Image: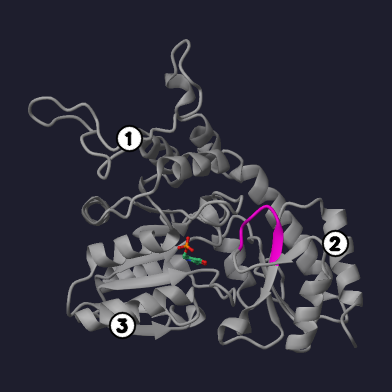
């Protein structure tokens, strides 16, 4: 039997035991740029680009959940930048997924390559066989966004360590509740908390977690020096979102599994890609390394028009380009020029009551021709 996992309960209550009579139960939104600082500078709070009590509260809570030191950022990409710029130097070699979140590749091409970083890409499903020797940093996103392919994190972590490369995992699609890259051997986790961690589609946010003090010190310096810092109010919103992550993610993943199983048998759907289905090419790996199968489903309809018609006909699945929120949303990813079928829809399954959601999806599919 699995050891009792108390990390989320510990995260929820990480500070409640420290509150004395009359103290606010929830973290306070601290809007200040300066702190009282007489004499020689001392203490944690000296200038607000360097530290803020509202950040500290969220970093401690996320740190309990990740079981690692955590730094927060004003977006997922700001977190990505802190790791890449904090770590890489001219001449270093970087391996990125060719099928992961495309802005990370764009950032590497536009900014890192001109500074002398050698950038190589490989598909997520092939990273296990990719030579890693000579690399400074290996970047993995599993399941990849939008194709939902998997990489074996234990195997890649072992090979990266043997090659002397740092393994960074973008865990945005899974959250710390669905997958624990650091426990599987990764060095660093990056997350866009704009997605499920905040979950209410009202704040851009991100975090970096690692048990490697050197990596964290570089990312902290990057944030402190260049000022890629979150606002106190946004931080508080994410703290509030985090408190319901477990119940939201539970509903989202169970809704996604239910829809994936039913859509797989639907005559209007050509293919369903979901790590929780036995038909997924890496289903055995998914069972082994993921705690849940996630809230994203890839569905392929006959063509672009059929996919657009389906999205348009849904009442509870809205057209939008993000995922992980309480509202179901969907989009045709080929509209961004990504290498997926024209009729491929990335479906982000939300928290709607399952019978209403399934009835809506079924009804929308009736509107799709042929
Ligand atoms: C997997 C992944 N990583 C990182 C990001 C970037 O996050 P943000 O939009 O919060 O900057 C995204 C955004 O969609 C993403 O999907």
Q: Residue at x 39, y 41 (%)?
A: 59
Q: Is residue 330 above or below residue 254?
A: below
Q: Residues within 10 Å of mark 3 (few under 14, many from 20)?
A: some
Label 1 to label 3, Cα distance in Å? 40 Å
Which image quadrant for residue 116?
bottom left
Colour style of the rendered protein structure:
one colour
Where does label 2 land, which residue?
Answer: 358
Quarter holding residue 242? top right
**At 47% from the left edge and 45% from the top edge, which residue is drawn?**
234
Task: Mark yes or no: residue 3 visible.
Answer: no
Q: Tell me if residue 220 comes above or below residue 167 in the rendering.
A: above
**Residue at 40% from the left image edge and 35% from the top image edge:** 57
Q: Are marks 1 and 3 in contact (CB under 8 Å)?
A: no
Mark 3 lies on residue: 119
Nearer the observer, 173 or 237: 237
Residue 252 x/y as whole percent: 69, 54
Which region shows up in magenta? Answer: 323-329
SS assignment for the magenta stretch, majority:
loop
- Whether label 2 lies within 8 Å of ligand 1 gets the answer no
Check residue 135 in the rendering and tell me which mark sits there, or answer none. none
- Total labels: the figure holds 3
Label 2: few (<14), some or many (≥20) within 10 Å? some
CB contact under 8 Å: marks 2 and 1: no
* Crowd rating for badge 1 (residues with CA inside 10 Å; few <14, some 14–19, many 20+): few
* Residue pointed to by mark 1: 32
Image location of residue 37, percent across then percent down: 17, 28
Which type of secondary structure does the marked residue at label 3 adopt?
A: strand
């Amino acid at each position: 039997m699995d050891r009792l996992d108390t990390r989320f309960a510990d995260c929820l209550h990480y500070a409640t035991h420290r509150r004395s009579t009359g103290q606010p139960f929830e973290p306070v939104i601290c809007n200040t740029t300066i702190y009282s600082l007489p004499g020689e500078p001392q203490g944690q709070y000296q200038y607000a680009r360097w530290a803020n009590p509202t950040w500290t509260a969220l970093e401690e809570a996320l740190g309990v959940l990740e079981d690692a030191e955590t730094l927060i950022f004003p977006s997922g990409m700001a977190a990505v930048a802190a790791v890449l710029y904090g770590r890489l130097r001219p001449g270093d070699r970087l391996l990125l997924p060719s099928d992961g979140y495309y802005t990370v590749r764009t950032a590497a091409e536009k900014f890192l390559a001109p500074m002398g970083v050698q950038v190589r890409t490989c598909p997520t499903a092939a990273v296990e066989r990719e030579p890693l020797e000579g690399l400074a940093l290996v970047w993995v996103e599993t399941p990849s966004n939008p194709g939902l392919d998997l990489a074996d994190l234990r195997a890649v972590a072992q090979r990266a360590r043997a090659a002397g490369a740092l393994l960074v995992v973008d865990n945005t699609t899974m959250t710390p509740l669905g997958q624990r890259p650091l426990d599987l051997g990764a060095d660093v986790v990056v997350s866009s908390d704009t997605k499920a961690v905040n979950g209410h589609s009202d704040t851009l946010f991100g975090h970096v977690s690692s048990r490697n003090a050197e990596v964290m010190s570089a990312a902290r310096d990057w944030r402190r020096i260049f000022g890629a810092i979150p606002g106190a109010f946004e931080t508080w919103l994410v703290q509030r979102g985090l408190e319901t992550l477990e119940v939201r993610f539970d509903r989202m993943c169970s809704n996604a599994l239910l829809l994936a199983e039913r859509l797989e048998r639907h005559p209007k759907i050509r293919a369903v890609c979901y790590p929780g289905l036995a038909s997924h090419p890496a289903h055995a790996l998914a069972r082994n390394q993921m705690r849940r199968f996630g809230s994203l489903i890839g569905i392929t309809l006959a063509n672009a028009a059929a996919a657009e018609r389906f999205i348009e006909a849904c009442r509870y699945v809205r057209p939008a380009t993000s995922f992980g929120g309480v509202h179901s949303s969907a989009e045709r990813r080929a509209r961004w020029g990504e290498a997926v079928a024209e009729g491929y829809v990335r479906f982000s399954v939300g928290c709607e009551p399952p019978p209403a959601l399934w009835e809506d999806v079924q009804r929308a599919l009736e509107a799709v021709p042929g």
